[in-house]
Amino acid sequence: MERRNTEVLIIGGGVIGASIGYYAAKSGIEVTIIDKGDIACGTSSRCDGNILAIDKEPGFDSQMSLESQKLVKQLSKELDLEFEYRAPGSILVCESEEEMIAAQSWVDRQKKAGLSFKMLDRSDIKQESPYFADDLLGGLECETDSTINPYLFTYSLFHGAIHYGAKVKLRCEVKGMRRNSETGLFHVNTDQGSIIAKKVVNAGGVWAPYIGNMLDLNIPIKPRKGHIIVASRNMPVGMRKVMEFGYLMSKFGKERTVDEETDKYGVALVFEPTESQNFLIGSSREFVGFNTKVDLDVVNCIARRTIRFYPKIADFLLIRTYAGLRPWTPDHLPIVSPVEQIPNYYIAAGHEGDGISLAAITGKLMTELLQEKSETIIPTHPIRFSRFQNVSTIQT
Amino acid sequence: MSDRKIIICRCEEVTLDQLVDTAESYRCSSRELKLRTRAGMGQCAGRTCRALVDEIVQKYTNEPTPHDIPLGYQAPIRPITFSLMGEKDHD
């Protein structure tokens, strides 16, 4: 007879698996989290750390972030380990009249959706940071945006999950999987032996398609590489997250008026002050497979972009660079969903650059899905897996 | 001053005490110890403390060596200004 080892097996020990593990264990579900490496050893430690609404499409997308912001604020109080939570808001800066017009319409749409957005003029920008280039025209602000340390957040969620009884197995790689059609139980083969689970949550991030493939699922997630520069401690440049408006264009794959290299590497300025008083500079977006090696041509391009927006940073020292892989989906929304054709199989992956932003809401929602609640914290329709499956798409 | 107050990571001012406590609590890899304490994440990129951090992990977690997830090396080799990094032809 088969003996079940765990009710829910979460595959993936990044921020998404951690959050699902925390909320599920807290609600009394028996969970085991496994990862082929360490906690937060992939995308969750090769990213920056924000809970942003500013860069989300107005509507479902931004509401999802807003709910996540509320949950993270709550988590900052209820979790034992601190994760450098702050809520200073964030801003986008514009370098052309066209961007200012687009920014105004972005603000109007967000305000209509009930979010706390406002336009900033040239003097507001100067007040924000004396380091900004003189020719920047203005920008916009989202007041509620918050920031955290992504790997400390993941560690903290794990710590909380373990407190509520979650089991964790690290350096435990999934080698294969089958579902017993009689008992409905999942048999998951790992390099630490077999695990039998009633339910499986695939939180594998960029590796989710590999895990899905073991049960013949085609999960349309691709790795989209990004680079980050760590600058040394120096004079305070700014107190909150800054992005160039072109970041939105780059994120959503729209046309920008920038030089060829900037366009090719998807480079858009992102500035993020950290609690350790240095700051992070991004960003780039490329489809180059599973390669996390730092490409110095891309870093050069990001450095130039930094100087364009902050000319006086030219003399600052950069001490480190790293690259990570965002789990991209074709419509830029994650998959947080049961899989119709495989009962008790769930996917929580494909958050692209929003994994940190959406981890809390994903954990909460997935817990509600595991409990088969009829009402959920956010609508599940836009992030269901079946939207990528032709047959189901025709039905809806 | 107790010996355990000695600073192991000069850039981030991380003491032996902090490192040993963290290694014992979480029985973690060097990489996790680095991320949890910031040892090795400063200006010198672990030039001084890298070997000590590895040693602490071995001693206090009883992990066999070499462990699966060692500390990585990230470019640049030494700190460099944004303007120098941003120059188009510097090879």
Image (spheres, grey):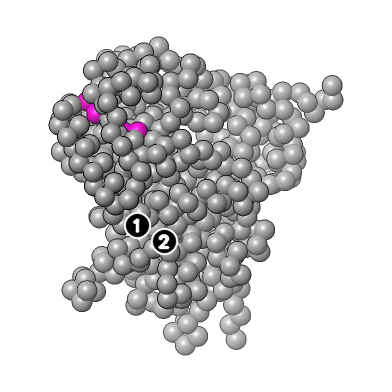
**Bounds of the magenta span?**
A91-95
Instruction: Write the residue at 37% across / 21% down.
Output: A127
Q: Is residue A106 left or right of residue A41?
A: left
Q: Quadrant of the N terminus of chain A?
A: bottom right
Chain letter behind tag 2: A
Residue bearing the label numbered 2: A348
Q: Is residue B1 left or right of residue A304?
A: right
Q: Nearer the viewer, residue A242 or A7?
A: A242
Residue at mark 1 shares a chain with residue at mark 2: yes
Instruction: Write the residue at 45% across / 70% down.
Output: A369
Q: Quadrant of residue B21?
A: top right
Instruction: Write the residue at 23% across / 43% down.
Output: A108
Q: Nearer the viewer, residue A48 or A206?
A: A48
Residue A299 rendering spot, x and y as whole percentages: 34, 27
Name the residue type under label 1: Pro
Task: Say few, some or many: other residues with alpha carbon within 10 Å of mark 2 (under 14 / 14 to 19 / 20 or more).
Answer: many
From the image, give the main secondary structure of the stretch colored magenta. Answer: strand
Gap in Å between the C-alphas at discs 1 and 2? Answer: 7 Å
Secondary structure type for disc 2 = strand
The answer to whether the residues at label 1 and label 2 have Cβ atoms under 8 Å apart is: yes
Secondary structure type for disc 1 = loop
Q: Is residue B17 left or right of residue A97?
A: right
Q: Is residue A94 magenta?
A: yes
Q: Is residue A353 magenta?
A: no
Q: Quadrant of the C terminus of chain A?
A: bottom left
Residue bearing the label numbered 1: A334
Q: Earlier in the sequence, mark 1 or mark 2?
A: 1
Residue A214 rendering spot, x and y as whole percentages: 39, 68
Instruction: Write the residue at 52% across / 48% down.
Output: A73
